[in-house]
Amino acid sequence: MDPALLSVSSRSSDDELVVSVSSSFRPGSHDATHDAILRSSDTVLFYVHSNIMKASSPRIFDQFFASATSQDDIIDVPESSAVLNVLLHSLYDMSCASYAPSFDILEEAVDRMAFYHISPASQIHPGRRLFSLMLTHVPLLPLRIYTFAAHYQLHELAVQSSSYTLALSVSTVTDEMAQRMGGVYLKRLMLLHIGRQETFKTIFQDPPGTHPVTRACGYEDQKRLARAWTLATAYLGWEGHIDLPINVIRASFSDLEEGLQCEGCKSTLRDRVEEVAVQWAAVKVGATIPHSSKYVGILCPQYSANDIICCSPNAILA
Ligand SMILES: [Zn+2]
């Protein structure tokens, strides 16, 4: 049985009528007595309180409540129980995480809000349960949720999901996604990714330093290490790993070290790898980088919606 439902049996002569009732919105589930009963398209009943719903939107369910003459009249609502469940939990600012709704269901519920004169922005912002629930889907669906957030101008959700898009290539943005997110948010996404690539190049461009020339390892020998470094960083960049994990960086250059004979070169390489690892880690999770810095990385919540980017990626996720 759907965890959202309770089945109530009512015996009338020889016929048994089974009625499904929402477990979160059953009679007595809230302190106040219900004053309306909503029935979803798959015949699940939700016992609700019009004053709570009207606090979010004075005109909510206008067209439906008008047909009810008493609190026990059943009002049919053209939504599935899964979608209505999300809508009502949002209006009551209750978490429906225990029902584990898919993002398809969450998105459908938000898409239907306009029909009930509900503003998505009023329901999805930090502090609201629906916002928190959507964040749980971001690691698996960053680009889709960024697109969704952009479409509804949900700036905070766009900010939170934007850093996760760094693990993907912008080439995965489809025409439909670009159209849905709109020009402004598409531009911000592009700048975010370009900025991240520039940061990568800035941190990794310098090869390891040199050590004093010895009989076994001269200037030309050490230039080979610089060339190998350039090739290795180019490979990492070509891989599109602009959200490159630190362990991948260390592993890549560890392979390089194994090919070296000179202890002096190994030492300068290890020093340089540690240096870039620290710098890259600071960009990933570190403190805010000045707005004017070239280390641009993410849509910044500290600036208005018209500002583009600043801060380090993931700083707001820490
Ligand atoms: Zn050397």
Image (cartoon, rainbow, N blue to C red):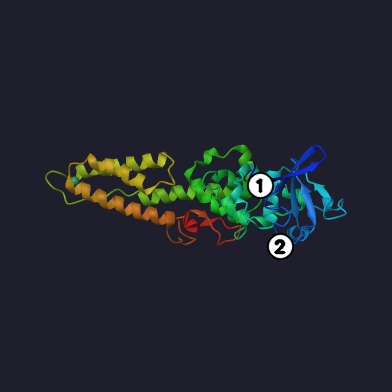
Instruction: Relative to 7, say whether 117 is above or below.
Output: below
Q: Answer yes or no: is residue 110 visible.
A: no
> What is the x, y in percent for residue 133?
59, 52
Residue occupying image coordinates x 62% and y 49%: 150
Residue, far front: 13
- Confirm if mark 2 falls within 8 A of ligand 1: no
Residue situated in front as seen by the camera: 89 or 266: 89
Q: Answer yes or no: is residue 14 visible.
A: yes
Q: How many marks?
A: 2
Q: Is mark 2 on a helix, strand or loop?
A: loop
Q: Do the residues labelled 2 and 1 touch (CB within 8 Å)?
A: no
> Gap in Å between the C-alphas at discs 2 and 1?
19 Å
Q: Residue 31 carries which label?
A: 2
Q: How crowded is mark 2: few (under 14 residues within 10 Å), some or many (20 or more)?
A: few
Callout 2 amino acid: Asp
Q: Residue 4 carries which label?
A: 1
Residue situated in front as seen by the camera: 180 or 50: 50
Callout 1 amino acid: Ala
- Quadrant showing the N terminus: top right
